[in-house]
Image (cartoon, rainbow, N blue to C red):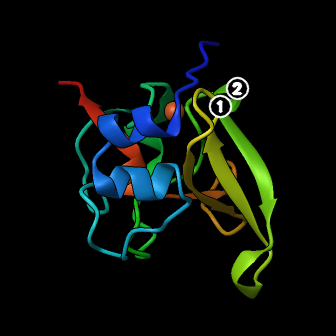
Amino acid sequence: MAKTDKTDAEWREQLTPEQYRVLRQKGTERPFTGEYSDTEEKGVYVCAGCGTELFHSETKFDAHCGWPSFYAPASEEHVAEEDDLTHGMRRTEVLCEGCGGHLGHVFPDGPQPTGLRYCINSAALKLEKQE
Ligand code: FE
């Protein structure tokens, strides 16, 4: 798949401060503040950094956690996962395979068919709406 490799200065110029903080500095937006936490519109969520297709709206569900949540990625090849032991927790970080940007975390408490909950920052996503 296509890879995006930019300098820190280029990312700062391209992204909004909030997108930069989340994607490039592994920040987390405050719950219930993101653009897509309650969105039910149909479409494809792509990476706000590089445009890689990340999640389909059909897999979005209301986890009542304040961040957009999905039970599966659009493609296993479009996301990467890494152990995250920061903040005194053992979590699994989710990153964009296209640009290495931080997206959020995945937890084993989601609905079927996967039982997974991809808890993703709105600032890392851009919804390309479909009718
Ligand atoms: Fe990306």
Q: Secondary structure at mark 1?
A: loop
Residue 103 appears left or right of 29: right
Read off the residue under disc 1.
Answer: 97
- Disc 1 + disc 2, Cβ < 8 Å: yes
Query: What percent of the width, then of the height, locates residue 34?
Result: 28, 63
Q: Earlier in the sequence, mark 1 or mark 2?
A: 2
Residue 28 appears left or right of 129: right
Read off the residue under disc 2.
Answer: 77
Number of labels in the image equals 2
Query: What percent of the width, then of the height, locates residue 2?
Result: 59, 13
Q: Quadrant of the C terminus?
A: top left
Q: Is mark 1 within 8 Å of ligand 1?
A: yes
Q: Nearer the viewer, mark 1 or mark 2?
A: 1
Outermost residue to the front: 9
Residue occupying image coordinates x 39% and y 69%: 29
Residue 113 appears left or right of 9: right
